[in-house]
Amino acid sequence: MGTTLDTGVKLVRNVGRYNIGAGSLDELQPLLARRRATARGQGDSAAVVFLVDEFFRGDNRLAERLGLQPGDALEFVATADEPTTAGIDAVVATLRRRGLTQPAAVVGMGGGITMDTAKCTSNLLANGGQAADYQGWDLVRVPGIFKIGIPTVSGTGAEATRTCVMTNPVSGLKLGMNSDHTVFDHVIMDPELTATVPRDQYFHTGMDAYIHCIESLGGSYRNAIGDAYSRETINLCRQVFGPGDMMAPERREQLMVAAYLGGCAIATSYVGVVHPLSAGLSVVLGIHHCVGNCIVMRAMQDFYPAAYDEFWRWADLQRVHIPQGVCAGLDDAGFEALYQASIVHGKPLTNALGEGYREILTRERMRALFEAM
Amino acid sequence: MGTTLDTGVKLVRNVGRYNIGAGSLDELQPLLARRRATARGQGDSAAVVFLVDEFFRGDNRLAERLGLQPGDALEFVATADEPTTAGIDAVVATLRRRGLTQPAAVVGMGGGITMDTAKCTSNLLANGGQAADYQGWDLVRVPGIFKIGIPTVSGTGAEATRTCVMTNPVSGLKLGMNSDHTVFDHVIMDPELTATVPRDQYFHTGMDAYIHCIESLGGSYRNAIGDAYSRETINLCRQVFGPGDMMAPERREQLMVAAYLGGCAIATSYVGVVHPLSAGLSVVLGIHHCVGNCIVMRAMQDFYPAAYDEFWRWADLQRVHIPQGVCAGLDDAGFEALYQASIVHGKPLTNALGEGYREILTRERMRALFEAM
């Protein structure tokens, strides 16, 4: 630790409460019943807004499991693209049109996209205005509607963080609504919900937690509690992705815990080389965040040699597919766009490589890295 | 994990927010200023109640560092004995007499005794009645006064838990006020505050975190998130108490994090053999909890052999004193009292030894264990 620098992050908000364990989803209805009763007692709306990953659209037990009641809203969240400010605004506009401006709760159930959508929606309902108004740091004025997060894919840590990442197609800005008010009031972690995740996606998303913590512990800006969360997240990933089936029930529970603790680590730490390059792939090629991180790992041998070896050993062991050659066929302008969209992330690159990161990650070096992906 | 049993603990409340890092105490005054302003805006009292470990009585910069204002209460908490229901009631009565029934915040600054006193006081001011009324589980009806915890000794995890342990001298009951409302709203972890802790006490208290996690991971009732917190707590303890000075600044920060994460582990896990026997020493001989645990470790070679070795290696390395022979001179009635006060803790003993724990911990065995201390 001797030569590391302080992250400067001094104040962290935690998730209010959490449920953990197989069958925890059964706790949702009693929790909502209490929220509804309190709202009714105050003369407020007892309606609940459910924002659910479109993956569950065909689940005919869904309404029953959620305890859907007349007057509630159930909206499915499309996951083909990551959240945009316009997409969030459309969800909020629909709810406002239906008079759901002060529901008793907003429930987000799904992967990172759905949870981020729920967090933004809750804040916007309570604060008014549009999503783009709050892209940045600490712009949300009042607490959002009581929000409940139910992850159904493990890895991003969105269930534990104070941001919800959105792309603004007009400004081109990919920036979160970073606020203590963005943190979920309640999180339900039920590993039964991840049993049906496709294996490749399970691995790609799980690696988001691992990669973040590798970058964090490999950086110069450090924090004692962030380091602790990161170490244990990596330790759990080793138990999940080593020999044996990564999707065995006890491993799905471990990965759910790893994702949550990885999210707690994010609060006080910075990423490194992987995330900026993955953001480049996202902005230029529309590649989703988690699979993007895995693709970037193809070129990370020089930067994170031990994690590189471990990552590819796991990918082999678990027989998962990581796309290859995604930058083949790009022209000079394409590589320039990738360079620009990556090098802009000065803070994590400084964390990983020092102030002179531009001399290390030259245009030529960056192009070679992207070509190796 | 295969043959372990579920702890049955499914719902956990987290500390609301925390500050971490050297100098974090400077964040107290801005935080209180916001609380006072909000209270004034609502026409409520802007006074703050400070309950501070008597260790700081002679600190002539204390009032300045706390931002003490006219109308606030500053009460020093005696630490010769662990909290009693009568002692808590006396603190609350003093505050009520001074009209401080709804202060803007209750601040507890000190070791486990002081933090537990602050947690109880906050709950009692808001809920009325007496401390003994709330000994048990989930008896606190409404949230307490906004409570801030500032640990100045690391180990008990009182800054993160949902209990505040009290002895009732009338009923003889040593039982906490276990409630989600007991959890601190805000915790300030400033490792500069532990620089002046006497070395023996620093070690004894730090070992509370270590021993709890050893017991927890050695038990049959397990929980994925509790296990994760416990493993990292132990990992941090290894960095703190191994070769080198356990009180170096970066190690004091690590132990503060270990104590907090150890407290988070407590929420979903059970202790084992050490805590029941330590409770026996406490009830019969008035020995404080943390040093009691260390004394019990003298007799734990058969039950926790690896932890036994590690514990005594650290005690040697760090040149700390663990009292010895504390039961010498006890008569048969004394040993019987120790047996009774220990064997009553069925849940942790079952966790450690199974349902047949009484056949393992016979009167004779227990007497031999206490004699070895």
Image (tube, coloured by chain):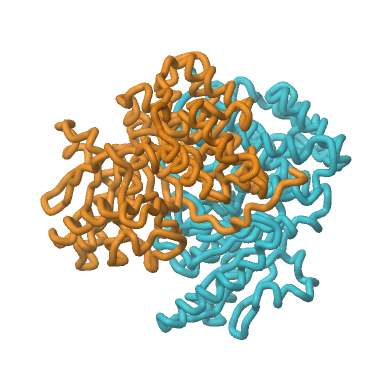
Chain colours: A cyan, B orange
Q: At 39% from the left edge and 68% from the top edge, which residue is drawn?
A: B141
Q: Nearer the viewer, residue B361 or A105?
A: B361
Percent of width and height locating residue A36: 51, 77
Percent of width and height locating residue B56: 22, 34
- As drawn, the residue found furthest toward the left would be B70
Q: Is residue B115 above or below residue A328?
A: below
Percent of width and height locating residue B230: 58, 38
Percent of width and height locating residue A31: 55, 70
Q: Is residue B173 above or below residue A32?
A: above
Write down the quadrant of residue A116 in the picture. bottom right
Write down the quadrant of residue A310 in the picture. top right
Q: Nearer the viewer, residue B155 or B88?
A: B88
Q: At 72% from the left edge and 21% from the top edge, which residue is drawn?
A: A302
Q: Nearer the viewer, residue B176 or B171?
A: B171
Is residue A344 among the parts visible in the rendering? no
Q: At 49% from the left edge and 79% from the top edge, which residue is drawn?
A: A37
* Picture quarter with the N terminus of chain B: top right
